[in-house]
Amino acid sequence: MKISTKGRYGLTIMIELAKQYGQGPIPLRQIAAENDLSEAYLEQLVSPLRNSGLVKSVRGAYGGYMLSKPPHLISAADVIRVLEGPIQPVEGIENEAPPQRQLWMGIRDAVKNVLDTTSLEDLASYKEQDSDDGYMFYI
Amino acid sequence: MKISTKGRYGLTIMIELAKQYGQGPIPLRQIAAENDLSEAYLEQLVSPLRNSGLVKSVRGAYGGYMLSKPPHLISAADVIRVLEGPIQPVEGIENEAPPQRQLWMGIRDAVKNVLDTTSLEDLASYKEQDSDDGYMFYI
DNA sequence: ATATTTCCTTCCATTCTACTCGGGAATGCT
DNA sequence: AGCATTCCCGAGTAGAATGGAAGGAAATAT
C-alpha cells in the first residue's frame, strides 16, 4: 500500500515546474539541487512524463523542462498514473470475489477522488493553513 | 500503491473465519482448498494474525483457527494493518514538504475511512446488490 | 499409536526499488 | 569553431520485498 519514490519525486518535479510555469525551461539540475535528490534518477522519472505529454523539453544549454499545460489543468492523478501505473489497490481486481472486489473498488475510488481533485496549482500555491501540530502521522 | 497478497489472502482467511464464526475451529487446509491458495503460505500469514490477537488457534486433530471476536467487531483495517503495516501511502510522511504532506494525508484518511467502516461481517454476509456490469476496473 | 493440525525456522527464485554510470545528441554562448 | 550545458538513452547493480516451498517439532482427538 505504498506510492514509491517514482511517484513522489515525479510529483516533486511537477510541483517545481508548476511554481515556475511560464518562466521558460527549468533544468533538472536545479530541481535536484533544491530538493536534495539525485539528478540522474530524476532524469529517469521525467522521461515517461515527457512521453506522456505532461511536460515538454528543450535540449541544450539553457534548456530544461516545462509543463505542457497550465498547472490547474494537470492533476496529481495524471502524474501518479504515468509513473506508478493505473490507480488500483490490488492487481486483477476483476478476479476477486465480490466482497473483496467491492472493498478494493471503494478504496480505489477514494484514492482516485483525492488525486483527481488536487491540481498542480493547488500543490504549487500551497499556503500554510491551520496548524498541523498534534496531527498523527501514523494511524 | 498496492496491497500485496499478504493483505489480500489474509483478508480471505478472515472472511472465511467470519462466515463460520461460532462453529468451532476451522483448519487452514479447508480455507486453502476452497480458495485455491497454498496452505503453507497461508500458514505464514495467519501467524501474525494470531500474535496480534485477532484470531485464536486450537492445535491438533480437529483443530484450526477462529476469530477471537465477533465479525462485526473486526474491521478490514485491523487485518490490513497487521499484515501490511500502518496504513500510509508513503514512508516518512512527516519529512515531506507541506503540500505533498497534505496530499498523502488526504489519501491516507480516505483509505483508512473505507477500511475502518468495513467489518468482517459486512464482507462475510455480502449479498449481490446491483449489477456491476459496465463498471470499469481500471481508472 | 496414529492422523491431524498448528507452530517455527530456514531457504529459494523472481521481481521491484532506487539508484549509478557511460555515452550520445542537441543547443546556446563566446 | 569550440565549449559548456542539458536532454536523451540503455545498461548495470545492491538490496529489499514478494510469494512461496520444505522440514520438522509439538499438541490433540480418536
Image: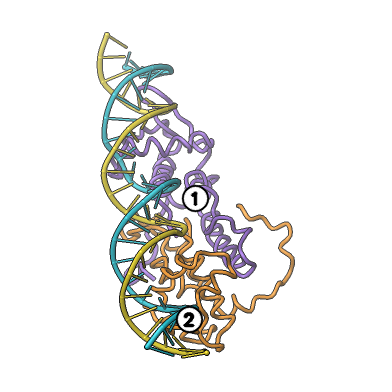
Chain colours: A orange, B purple, C yellow, D cyan
Nearer mark to the viewer, of 2 and 1 = 2
Q: Which mark is residue A64?
A: 2
Q: Can residue B62 be seen in this view?
A: yes
Disc 1 sits on a residue from what chain?
Answer: B
Residue identifier under label 1: B76
Q: How crowded is mark 2: few (under 14 residues within 10 Å), some or many (20 or more)?
A: some
Taking depth in this image into account, of C30 and A71 the one nearest to the observer is: C30
Q: In this view, does A56 lie above or below A101?
A: below
Q: In this view, does A79 lie above or below A56?
A: above
Q: Residue at x 69, y 58 (%)?
A: A135
**Amino acid type of disc 2?**
Gly
Question: Mark 2 falls on what kind of element?
Answer: strand
Q: Residue at x 48, y 81 (%)?
A: A64
Taking depth in this image into account, of A76 and A94 the one nearest to the observer is: A76
**Amino acid type of disc 1?**
Ala
Which corner quadrant of the image does residue A136 belong to?
bottom right
Which corner quadrant of the image does residue A92 belong to?
bottom left
Taking depth in this image into account, of A119 and A43 the one nearest to the observer is: A43
The picture places residue A63, in percent across and down from the top left corner, at 47, 83
Q: Residue at x 65, y 75 (%)?
A: A126
Q: In this view, does A72 lie above or below A38?
A: below
Disc 2 sits on a residue from what chain?
Answer: A
The picture places residue A8, in percent across and down from the top left corner, at 51, 65
Q: Is residue A57 visible?
A: no
The picture places residue B41, in percent across and down from the top left corner, at 35, 38
Q: Which mark is residue B119?
A: none
Q: How far apart are marks 2 and 1 (CA)?
A: 46 Å
